């Protein structure tokens, strides 16, 4: 089964699913509740364009006060209980690459997660995966990323590619931090996704990711940053982003038929 995490601007896609099951995160762990505006905190399971999927309508964030182990619990549930083996991660992110503009989409080629705790700390997946130490050389599936690139091209839209860096939040970064992140090779920054990708990859789930560049990062535009502005740009990009994701889901499903 294909799962998709619906970041800012994509939540409406869950409303288009012919749902037969809705799982609140609190049913997975009674302590889990999404507290961010626009994040409903549930998994919607059903059919989208005739394809059975699981859509995370909102996510759990580290900055909400949860441990990293709590943040990734929904992904373990989706693998074990729903049979998820493919995962599309989406988010709204700040653009660090100076060639990016608000409204651009970026395929996540790789990530930097060194500024937040690993979700694998204290977790031993040896019995399930055969390994305690997990290779992160290719977290983002190259075949899946190529599909995203091809589907964007079919829609006549240029799509960027780059490295995503996750910070803890909830504060936005300082201009000095953005300069440092650019030096490290980051193209976009956000407060989620990298740890989710790491954990899912360790579980054996094939992962791809797309960021909506909702704003230029601190110090790049001279404008103050706000969650409202991030949400505004993400919503403006939402219609195209939803169309792209529907097409990507159909192409990922076609892989199962070929296999």
Image (cartoon, rainbow, N blue to C red):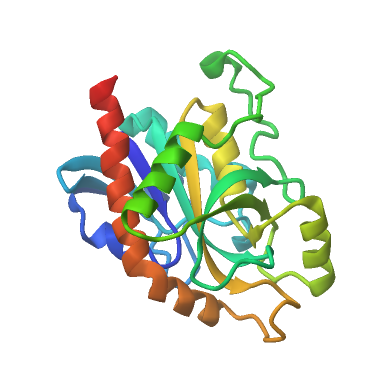
All told, the count of numbered labels is: 0
- As displayed, is residue 65 above or below residue 197? below
Q: State whether residue 235 appears in this view.
A: yes
- As displayed, is residue 117 above or below residue 86? below
Residue drawn where x is 32% and y is 57% of the image: 155
Where's the C terminus, which quadrant?
top left
**Residue at the bottom extreme, as displayed:** 223
Residue 111 falls left or right of residue 153: right
Q: Nearer the viewer, residue 8 or 247?
A: 247
Question: For residue 52, which quarter of the picture?
Answer: top left
Residue drawn where x is 60% and y is 16% of the image: 126
Residue 178 falls left or right of residue 11: right
- As displayed, is residue 122 above or below residue 236? above
Residue 120 percent across, percent down from the top left:
65, 34
Question: For residue 219, which quarter of the picture?
Answer: bottom right
Residue 190 percent across, percent down from the top left:
62, 60
Where's the N terminus, which quadrant?
top left
Residue 220 percent across, percent down from the top left:
72, 77
Residue 78 falls left or right of residue 231: left
- As displayed, is residue 177 above or below residue 29? below
Q: State whether residue 30 appears in this view.
A: no
Residue 70 falls left or right of residue 152: right
Residue drawn where x is 66% and y is 25% of the image: 135
Residue 130 percent across, percent down from the top left:
58, 13
Q: Nearer the viewer, residue 183 or 83?
A: 183
Residue drawn where x is 23% and y is 25% of the image: 257
């Amino acid at each position: 089964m294909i799962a998709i995490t619906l970041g800012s601007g994509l939540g409406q896609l869950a409303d288009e699913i012919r749902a037969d099951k809705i799982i609140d995160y609190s049913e997975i762990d009674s302590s889990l509740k999404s507290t961010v505006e626009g994040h409903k905190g549930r998994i919607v399971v059903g059919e989208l364009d005739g394809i059975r999927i699981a859509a995370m309508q909102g996510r759990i964030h580290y900055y909400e006060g949860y441990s990293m182990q709590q943040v990734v619990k929904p992904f373990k549930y989706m693998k074990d209980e729903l049979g998820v083996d493919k995962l599309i991660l989406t988010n709204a992110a700040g653009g660090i690459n100076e060639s990016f503009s608000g409204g651009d989409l970026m395929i996540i080629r790789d990530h930097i997660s060194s500024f937040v705790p690993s979700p694998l700390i204290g977790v031993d997946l040896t019995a399930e995966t055969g390994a305690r130490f997990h290779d992160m050389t290719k977290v983002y599936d190259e075949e899946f990323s190529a599909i995203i690139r091809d589907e964007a091209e079919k829609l006549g839209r240029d799509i960027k590619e780059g490295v995503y860096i996750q910070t803890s939040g909830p504060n936005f970064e300082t201009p000095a931090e953005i300069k440092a992140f650019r030096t490290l090779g980051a193209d976009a920054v956000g407060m989620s996704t990298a740890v989710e990708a790491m954990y899912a990859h360790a579980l054996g789930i094939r992962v791809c990711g797309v960021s909506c560049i909702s704003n230029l990062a601190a110090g790049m535009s001279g404008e103050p940053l706000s969650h409202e502005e991030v949400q505004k740009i993400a919503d403006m990009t939402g219609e195209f982003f939803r169309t792209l994701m529907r097409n990507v889901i159909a192409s990922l499903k076609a892989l199962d038929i070929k296999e």
